[in-house]
Amino acid sequence: MASHCYILVNFLALISVLNLCSASRLLTTPLDDPQDQLLRYHNGALLHGRIAVNLIWYGNFKPSQRAIVADFITSLSASQPTQPSVAAWWKTIEKYYHLAGSKTPSSLSLYLGKQLLDDTYSLGKSLSEKQIVQLASRGDHKNAINVVLTAADVAVDGFCVNRCGTHGSKSALVKGKNYKFAYIWVGNSESQCPGYCAWPFHQPIYGPQSPPLIAPNNDVGLDGVVMNLGGLLAGTATNPFGNGFYQGPSDAPLEAASACPGVYAKGAYPGYAGDLLVDPSSGASYNAHGANGRKYLLPAIYDPSTSKCSTLV
């Protein structure tokens, strides 16, 4: 099993990495060779084909909260008449497949799969990494990303200490054949550490202090979940099994979204997410339109074709 953390970097860390990454700064010289990119290709398989994103809800979530995430997954492949869109944000991921060349098929299509509910807290309210994998294993074991979402009253090892979520992979036998499925875990930080995992929709724990922004779906915890889930999906697609695109040690890699910490729009700097769009009726800040009239805030993705952190606005 491989597992990789996705950390919404606190602002002390942001200050130290800003010279590496900003919405408009080159991260390396643009080159066609993937080995010369900031995120080096390690010759492993990327996710390809039609992949189900199964949502495993652990703990108490309202139907309205589940709809926020489900609509986000649907938005990844659904064309939206209003731009900028979630689907346009996801298009940057395709560039990694072009860089991988003939080593991997270049087609990836994500769709909303099953939704499994465990509102009885069957494993308790304090979970280990092993139990997260156990929950993820309840989803499909082939052609799937199984996403475990833990409720606001569930503690997970490392949550709010050094991570907001993680992604990894696990082997499983399907009809006598060995397959690997990808999994993601993200926690709802609303009552535990919104300043760490749901910034800029909450006052930050560290660094420059500025007023929190209004969450586009009026739910600080779940809007934070979507931000972190988006980054983890980008890492899962481009480094699903620990040997795809990344920089640094394989057990703590810098990946497609984590290469651009704290950047959500042009003009971002420590304590400021960037020049975001603002809904005139609600005052909510966002950078992407989604299905069913949704609005979301999504992290910048490192664009290997320009060697920049790519933002929608």
Image (tube, rainbow, N blue to C red):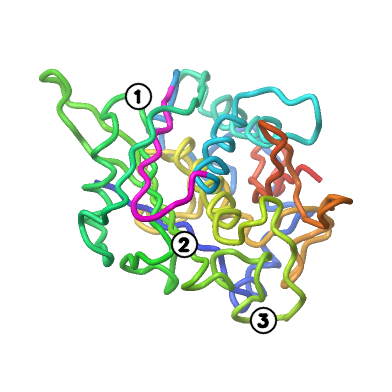
- Give the labeled residue for mark 3: 207
* Residue that numbered label 2 is attached to: 164
Magenta segment, principal secondary structure?
Answer: strand
Q: Secondary structure at mark 3?
A: loop
Q: Secondary structure at mark 2?
A: loop
Q: Which residue is mark 1?
A: 143
| Above or below, 41 relative to 58 | above
Q: Nearer the viewer, residue 59 or 167?
A: 59
Which three-letter amino acid code belongs to the residue tagged 2?
Answer: Cys
User: Separation of disc 1 and disc 3 at Cα?
Assistant: 41 Å
Asked whether the residues under the numbered discs 1 and 2 touch, taking CB atoms below 8 Å apart as contact, a structural biologist would say no
Q: Count every numbered label the image shows and give the total.
A: 3
Measured as percent of width and height from the top left, residue 59 is found at 35, 55
Q: Look at the image and give the residue range highlighted in magenta.
A: 51-63
Q: Nearer the viewer, mark 3 or mark 2?
A: 2
- From the top left corner, tell me how far across and down residue 277 is, in percent: 83, 50
Residue 165 sits in which quadrant? Answer: bottom left
Residue type, numbered disc 1: Asn
Sequence-earlier tag: 3 or 2 = 2
- 45 left or right of 87 in image: left
Q: Nearer the viewer, residue 177 or 137?
A: 137
Name the residue located 35 percent from the left edge and 24 percent from the top edge. Answer: 143
Residue 35 x, y percent position in the rendering: 53, 40
Which amino acid, by three-letter code, is at mark 3?
Gly
Q: Which mark is residue 61?
A: none
Q: Is residue 103 above or below residue 290?
A: above
- C-alpha gap between disc 1 and disc 2: 25 Å
